[in-house]
Amino acid sequence: MASTVQLSTKAFVTKTEIREAIFVDTSEVSRTDDELNTLYGFVNWVSDALEAFIGVPIIQKSVTEYNDGGGEYIFLTSLPVVTVSSVAEKGIALVAGTDYVYDPDYIAVRKITTADAYVASTFLTGSMANKVIYVSGYGTQTRDGSNELTSVSLIPEDFKLAAYIWVQHLWAKGPQNYSPEQGEATGGRAAIPYAVKELMRNRIPQVHWIGS
């Protein structure tokens, strides 16, 4: 038999990377299927938990947000913003660079009246009148023909180190404690190892209000 646990769409370390980090061995041969399934289950759980802790996507994903308009800016809430895919007012698509620009300083889409980004306008007003689709997150996954995760790109090293530390913490408690540990960890941030909290503290977005 072989491991049956597939790494999730939120996983940001590969099976080879986590085996090397925890076992100091990239081979699956020296481990039982149960051990490998537990290890990869830890990776999936930690991937979800770390993303929940910092409150933003780690693996890039498409985000759709609606706004009632009436102002010059539509502030985006899912960080980091990779690219703005489209903006529409009451179902009418706007043209990037002509109708709007993305302002990374404000993390917002800005309405303009001409190709000159200094000439501002305002978005139409109405309940959910404005729709913005954008890509948010840090890294990307590559999968093979069987949908197995083969590599992850653009992930900062502190994210990977945090995952290794947390998975090691879970493994050290004993694979037999997998389910109880899951139950403990879902209780909140208290279950996060201190070293992981310190690594990820600066990754939690800080909200800055723009003065009126």
Image (tube, rainbow, N blue to C red):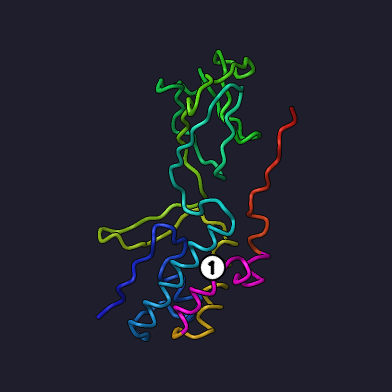
At a point 56% along the width and 37% down the height, the residue shown is: 76
Tag 1 residue: 163
- Queried whether the magenta region covers residue 186, the answer comes back as yes
- Which quadrant, please, contains the N terminus? bottom left
Q: Which of the 4 quarters of the picture holds residue 109?
A: top right
- Queried whether the magenta region covers residue 180, the answer comes back as yes
154 vs 95, nearest the viewer: 95
Q: Residue furthest front?
A: 127
- The prevailing secondary structure element of the residues shown in magenta is helix
Q: Which of the 4 quarters of the picture holds residue 194?
A: bottom right
Q: Position of residue 102 (x, y in %)?
A: 56, 30
Q: Position of residue 112 (x, y in %)?
A: 57, 18
Please rate how many residues cluster around mark 1, counting C-alpha atoms within 10 Å: few if below 14, some from 14 to 19, many from 20. many
Q: Secondary structure at mark 1?
A: helix
Q: Please state the extent of the stretch shown in magenta in the rendering.
A: 177-198
83 vs 73, nearest the viewer: 73
Q: Position of residue 27 (x, y in %)?
A: 38, 79
Q: Left or right: where does residue 196 sit relative to residue 11?
A: right
- Which quadrant, please, contains the C terminus? top right
Q: Residue furthest right?
A: 211
Q: Position of residue 115 (x, y in %)?
A: 54, 15
Q: Left or right: where does residue 113 sit relative to residue 198?
A: left
Look at the picture and state if 9 lies above or below 14. Answer: above
At a point 44% along the width and 30% down the height, the residue shown is: 86
Q: Amino acid under label 1?
A: Ala
Look at the picture and state if 105 lies above or below 116. Answer: below
Look at the picture and state if 25 lies above or below 210. Answer: below
